Image (cartoon, helix red, strand yellow):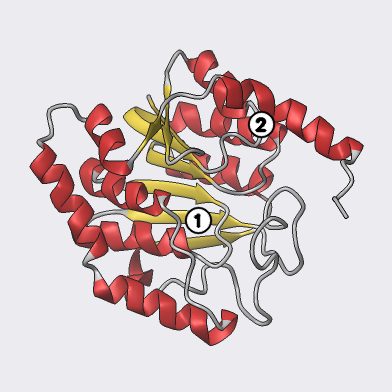
Amino acid sequence: MKRPISFGRVVNFARRMPAVLTQPERLYAQEAIKKIWPEASPKDIEQLRYEYYKNDDLFLDVDRLSLSKRRRRAQWEPWLEFQYMLVRMHKPEIYVETGVFDGISSAVILQAMEDNNKGRLVSIDLPATEPIKGATDHMLEGSLPPGVNPGWCVPQRLRNRYDLRLGDARELLPAALKELGKIDIFFHDSLHTYDHMIFEYRCAWPHLKDGGFVVSDDIFANPAMLHFSKEVGRKYLNIRNGFGCVRK
């Protein structure tokens, strides 16, 4: 029997349409890096991509941690390759992210910082002790394993650059940005509703240094990225169909 189409699904589909119908071309990670830094040689870009994939310590450490609680290996999303290359190229001093969950993206960012020998990651997350609608409810597991904090998949060897803050991003993000002053990269991966996404983009933008980045997962969940990019007069990149990047 076919699953009935609910009114909620129809409304959600309608909300997504403006972003989906106007989406930019889909880019692979190395194509996106070349668009951001056209002066970079294809050979150098490919070398960074290779350095990500040859990092046995990162993949083995995170997979071992994931197996210990999830009884499976980590989910290595395609856009993590772009995250690694972005950090290696831009060499941020301060990177702020919202939405940590198991901490796979945090581990990739921290590994890139370690390879740069530079950087600090400030991560904000509301612990998902049960599935959070619009954030973790669409994941393979919607809640954290019992007895662990967000970021539990970040290897111990990478934690010297890691500043994890637990609580609601609507409270903690403005406070952290005020404390930090200027940042280099902001990454949204928390609550994927229109109001929350555009709130975070708008909150982070004034604190970005010139040339800094807002990056975001699930940019076609609603038109927040589309509307925000028009507000600030910047085009956004679409990496691997749903991961967005705007440069200030």
Q: How many neighbours does mark 2 have within 10 angstroms: few (below 14), some (14-19), or many (20 or more)?
A: many
Q: Residues within 10 Å of mark 1 (few under 14, many from 20)?
A: many
Instruction: Give the camera-side residue of 242 and 195.
Output: 242
Let me know if residue 15 appears in the view.
yes
- The amino acid type, in three-letter code, at marker 1 is Ser
The image shows residue 22 at horizontal and vertical percentages of 55, 19
The residue tagged with tag 2: helix, strand or loop?
Answer: loop
| Residue 73 drawn above or below residue 241 | below
Q: Residue at x 38, y 70 (%)?
A: 159
Q: What's the CA distance linking mark 2 and mark 1?
A: 23 Å
Q: Quadrant of the N terminus?
A: bottom right
* Residue 26 image position (x, y, % from top left): 41, 32
- Residue that sits furthest to the bottom in the current view: 68
Please tell me which residue is depicted at 72% across the width and 57% down the height of the picture. Answer: 137
- Which residue carries the number 2 mark? 222
Amino acid type of the residue that numbered disc 2 sits on in the rendered structure: Asn
> Is 51 displayed left or right of 81 in the figure?
left
- The percent coordinates of residue 217 (x first, y second) are 53, 43
> Which quadrant holds residue 201?
top right
Locate residue 35: give its quadrant.
Answer: top left
Horizontal and vertical percent for residue 94?
A: 36, 47
Please say if 30 is above or below 64. Answer: above
Callout 2–callout 1 Cβ contact below 8 Å: no
The residue that disc 1 covers is 123
Depth check, front residue: 177 or 89: 89
